[in-house]
Image: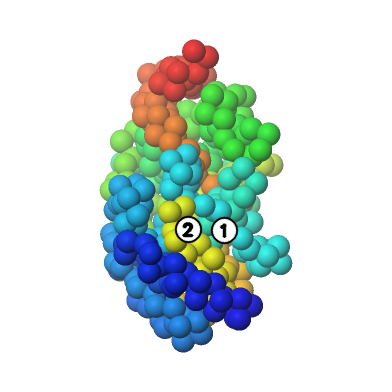
Amino acid sequence: MKRTIVLVVALLMVTSIFLTVSASEAGKLIIWADETRAPVLQQVAKSFEAAYGVPVEIQEIGFGDIRGKLATTAPKGEGPDIIIGAHDWLGELIQNGLIGPIVLPKDVVKEFDPVAIQAFSWGGQLYGLPYATECVALIYNKDLVPEVPGTFADLLTTAKGLTDKEAGKYGFLIQEPDPYHTFALFSAGGGYIFGANADGTLNPCDIGLDNAGAIAGATLLDKMVKDGIEVAGADYNTVTGLFNDGKLAMMIGGPWTLPNIQKAGINYGVAPIPTINGNTPKVFVGVQGFMISAFSKNKVLANTFVKDFLVSKDVMLQLYKQGQRPPAYIPALDAVKDNPDIQGFAASAANGIPMPKIPEMASVWGAWSDSLSLIVNQKEDPATAMHNAVAQIKKLLKCGQ
């Protein structure tokens, strides 16, 4: 394998004499990474250079800027060979011809979290190497709720007993109106955002936010309001503030909430959301990974860098230490089994589904959020609110036209 790569490198270097030098330059790898991950990649680059004599340049780009810069520079031959990015960029990047598939042996694919692999798959091909997952889970105050309730019904019973609004104390809250944090209620009964085509890609005109399962979830939210558990106006700052003050027993939240919880000295735990009517709720999962530019002059080298130098427990653990998110690489996740927070979020992600990765998702949030607002403010019944939301989304997406 090494001899093959050396021959390829030699051929690329000869070819580069006749090409205009650009950011993606034959015989040299350019990698775009944010400042958090760049230091780890610098060390990996040294190993790659030592093995193959191929220079690797790590360019620090703000995570939020990578997608836009790739779109403007890559077609002009000025972009990178490899980028770090989020899986929900995939649809836009593929549809615009900006990234190409990567090739991993089947036995290597099996070493990754299946949800993470699904997140970076499109039309039967893999377009990214995942390294971290991110999702919400049940975060609970162990001093108020020593053990995770066995079912969601048990959770609500416990929450009602702990709620004393006059004293400013609450048993359980979900941020509202927030589709991202509320999706578990919808998914438990079979609600979904977009259905799938035969090749596994998403169909933006097959919307399942007003099917029977979704309406059941919206009805559950409505009942939580009527029972005095959920309250209108429970936004992010309200929910996390109450939890950090020890006045909220349970909430649905992500790993980004933990630093302030720890600073507040709360004795907390992280666990998957309990079953709803016997069904496991599915949360949205975000996955980060490495992708190869379709305009790279070094696709063979780039794939070798990804496959042979990033698929490593040590590298994945270094990336984990920088980002503090569950590793998508199972050997690395197993190596941090003594971290209950990471394992709690990983268990929640294992039951989840990747955030829809097509641009049409941007048209969903507003209408869905408006419907939740109407429900929690008791201005519209759940079925009407969700039917109207789906009708609005389909109109925005010009479905049926």
Callout 2 amino acid: Met
- Crowd around label 1: few <14 · some 14–19 · many ≥20 (10 Å): many
Asked which secondary structure carries label 2, the reply is strand
The answer to whether marks 2 and 1 mark residues whose Cβ atoms lie closer than 8 Å is: yes
Q: Position of residue 73 (x, y in %)?
A: 31, 51
Q: Nearer the viewer, residue 67 or 214?
A: 67
Give the numbered dot on residue 102: 1
**Residue drawn at point x = 64 percent, y = 56 percent:** 114
Q: Is residue 119 left or right of residue 109?
A: left
Q: Is residue 141 visible?
A: no
The residue at the point 52 percent across, 14 percent down is: 400
Q: Which residue is mark 2?
A: 291
Tell me which label, 2 or 1, sits earlier in the chain: 1
Q: Nearer the viewer, residue 110 or 265?
A: 110
Q: Is residue 32 left or right of residue 155?
A: left
In the figure, is residue 284 to the left or right of 275? left
Q: Is residue 196 visible?
A: yes
Where does residue 227 sit, x and y in percent of width and height?
Answer: 47, 32
**Amino acid type of the residue tagged 1 in the rendering:** Ile
